[in-house]
């Protein structure tokens, strides 16, 4: 069931490639805007790079979350999924995995290129990718809670951001902190460990909250 | 008991500023609640008058 | 005597009306007493001068900001788990007062920071966590106000509040971590002054006053919410004054 759900979502996302690609382009554009706003000085850019890349990743995730359940909700598929004998937790997990693969993984892949723009070293680029790899699942899964709560509401896009961005703060702190530690030459391992613990905890518990929120939103 | 120095040793703006702000917040809360209550009561009376009142 | 009848909004409405004066008047008296002790009896601080007197409103506001959030999550959870309307209405009522106290905590904190640290805002662990707490409150209030169906709004708010309350310790820890790593050499983390005697009394009295005030205001707002939501209940017309 899980495999089928992920595969289905991937196919649907492939048919609408533009949506996922626009998230990616948004990420690239936002990251590129900061040097234009702040100035091309290398030292300065290197110091703000972790924060900028991470915040842009957060914002790009917000964009893709609105689509997570809305399309299925509109054509009635979501109600059918709620009625399946399989646990709703698995359904949520499947949809979140597909969203991560289509929207977040491209961000992780393009992040090294953006890091080069900011003058980061190879070692730091590696840490950047690892931190994003560990952190973006958390963004997807906690964001899914917001998406489920605001299902079908007007102006749900902005509302999702208001609900979910405060919850993203720990991920941001540890993720950006890992990259920053690497830039300063310190070991990022403590940040990475804490980030991984956040990832594990949220992957286990958040889909349960999302499932509850889905049931509440569809009555 | 000692009479306080009203200028608060030079920090008067900050001390009285904070307390003024708090006062404004409390007053705002009470006034808005009162307003909300009055508006609701009026709406309530239109919908269902008491047993001794008429609304026609 | 059956106290469970008070779980009904219609029955609780008059009871709340009777309870409110018992909290409102003592709140006013304790406010006056707290200000008296804080300004007329407590001496000038050695380090901070008279600027420290802001804590008599700042500390109660911060404490209540956090306490009301936990309480709000608790009531929302109860309302969701037991399908109790009144508990959810209580959560909605708490949210606004809680947000107000959080905002007040931030403002008075800034007013305290300027004379003592030299800047209006500093990104220390407590201020930053309080700011995020304000965002959590705003999220809850926005979510509830954007959902038309009252019961869906109650339950959605409950999920959000519970997720938030679990996250608050995580957020606080991560912000503290972030702050200790980035501690600027120029700005010291504020040490809580060893507080004793009349200063402590003034703070505790103000804390009690704020707490009593919150109870009164939350119950007043609860009555407004009951009034709005129970309009069509026939039994309510007799009870609504």
Image: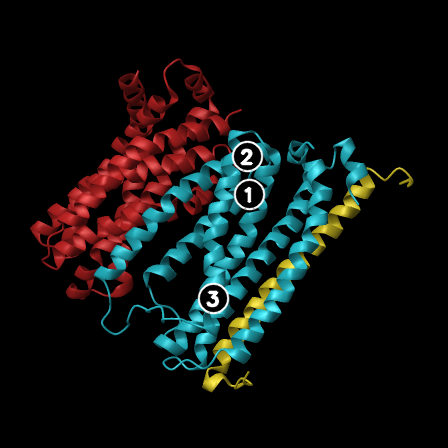
Chain colours: A red, B yellow, C cyan
Instruction: Indicate the chain on which mark 1 is placed.
Output: C
User: Badge 3 is on which residue?
Assistant: C58
User: Badge 2 is on which residue?
Assistant: C79
Left of A163 or right of it: where is A187?
Answer: left
- Residue C15 is drawn in which quadrant? top right
For marks 3 and 1, the one nearer the N-term is 3
Left of A139 or right of it: where is C45?
Answer: right
Q: Residues within 10 Å of mark 2 (few under 14, many from 20)?
A: many
Residue drawn 25% across the image and 35% down it: A200
User: Cβ–Cβ below 8 Å for labels 2 and 3?
Assistant: no
Foreground: B1 or C101? Answer: B1
Q: CA distance from mark 2 to mark 3?
A: 31 Å
Tag 1 secondary structure: helix
Q: Which mark is residue A86?
A: none
User: Badge 1 is on which residue?
Assistant: C91
Where is residue A201 drawn, in percent x and y?
28, 36
In this view, A177 is above or below B54: below
Left of C148 or right of it: where is A162?
Answer: left
User: Cβ–Cβ below 8 Å for labels 1 and 2?
Assistant: yes
Where is residue C119 drawn, in percent x and y?
37, 74
């Amino acid at each position: 069931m899980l495999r089928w759900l992920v595969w289905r979502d991937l196919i649907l996302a492939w048919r609408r490639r533009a949506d996922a690609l626009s998230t990616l382009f948004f990420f690239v554009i936002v990251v590129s805007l900061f040097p234009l706003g702040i100035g091309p000085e290398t030292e300065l850019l290197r110091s703000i790079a972790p924060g900028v890349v991470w915040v842009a990743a957060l914002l790009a995730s917000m964009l893709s979350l609105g689509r997570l359940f809305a399309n299925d909700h509109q054509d009635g598929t979501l109600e059918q999924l709620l009625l399946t004998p399989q646990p709703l937790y698995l359904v949520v997990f499947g949809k979140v995995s597909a969203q991560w693969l289509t929207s977040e993984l491209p961000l992780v892949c393009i992040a090294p290129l953006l890091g080069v723009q900011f003058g980061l070293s190879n070692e730091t680029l590696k840490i950047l990718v690892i931190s994003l790899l560990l952190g973006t699942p958390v963004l997807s899964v906690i964001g899914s809670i917001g998406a489920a709560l605001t299902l079908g509401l007007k102006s749900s896009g902005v509302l999702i951001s208001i609900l979910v961005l405060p919850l993203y703060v720990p991920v941001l702190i540890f993720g950006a902190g890992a990259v920053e530690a690497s830039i300063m030459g310190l070991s990022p391992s403590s940040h990475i460990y804490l980030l991984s613990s956040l990832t594990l905890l949220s992957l286990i518990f958040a889909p349960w909250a999302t499932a509850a929120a889905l049931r509440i939103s569809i009555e | 008991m000692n009479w306080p120095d009203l200028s608060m040793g030079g920090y008067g703006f900050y001390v009285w500023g904070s307390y003024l702000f708090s006062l404004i917040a409390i007053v705002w809360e009470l006034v808005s609640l009162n307003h909300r209550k009055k508006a609701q009561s009026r709406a309530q009376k239109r919908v269902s008058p008491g047993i001794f009142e008429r609304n026609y | 005597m059956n106290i469970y009848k008070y779980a009904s909004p219609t029955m609780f409405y008059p009871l709340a009306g009777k309870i409110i004066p018992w909290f409102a008047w003592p709140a006013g008296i304790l406010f006056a007493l707290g200000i008296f002790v804080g300004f007329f009896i407590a001496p000038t601080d050695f380090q901070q001068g008279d600027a420290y007197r802001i804590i008599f409103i700042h500390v109660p506001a911060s404490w209540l900001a956090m306490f009301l959030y936990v309480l709000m999550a608790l009531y929302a959870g109860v309302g969701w788990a037991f399908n109790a309307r009144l508990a959810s209405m209580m959560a909605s009522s708490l949210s606004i007062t809680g947000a107000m106290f959080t905002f007040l905590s931030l403002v008075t904190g800034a007013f305290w920071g300027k004379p003592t640290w030299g800047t209006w805002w500093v990104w220390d662990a407590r201020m930053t966590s309080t700011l995020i707490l304000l965002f959590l409150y705003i999220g809850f209030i926005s979510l509830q106000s954007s959902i038309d169906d009252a019961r869906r709004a109650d339950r959605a708010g409950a999920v959000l509040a519970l997720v938030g309350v679990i996250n608050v310790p995580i957020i606080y820890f991560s912000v503290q971590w972030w702050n200790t790593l980035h501690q600027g050499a120029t700005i010291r983390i504020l040490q809580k002054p060893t507080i004793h005697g009349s200063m402590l009394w003034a703070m505790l009295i103000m804390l009690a006053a704020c707490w009593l005030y919150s109870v009164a205001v939350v119950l007043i707002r609860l009555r407004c919410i009951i009034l709005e939501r129970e309009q069509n209940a026939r039994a309510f017309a007799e009870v609504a004054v």
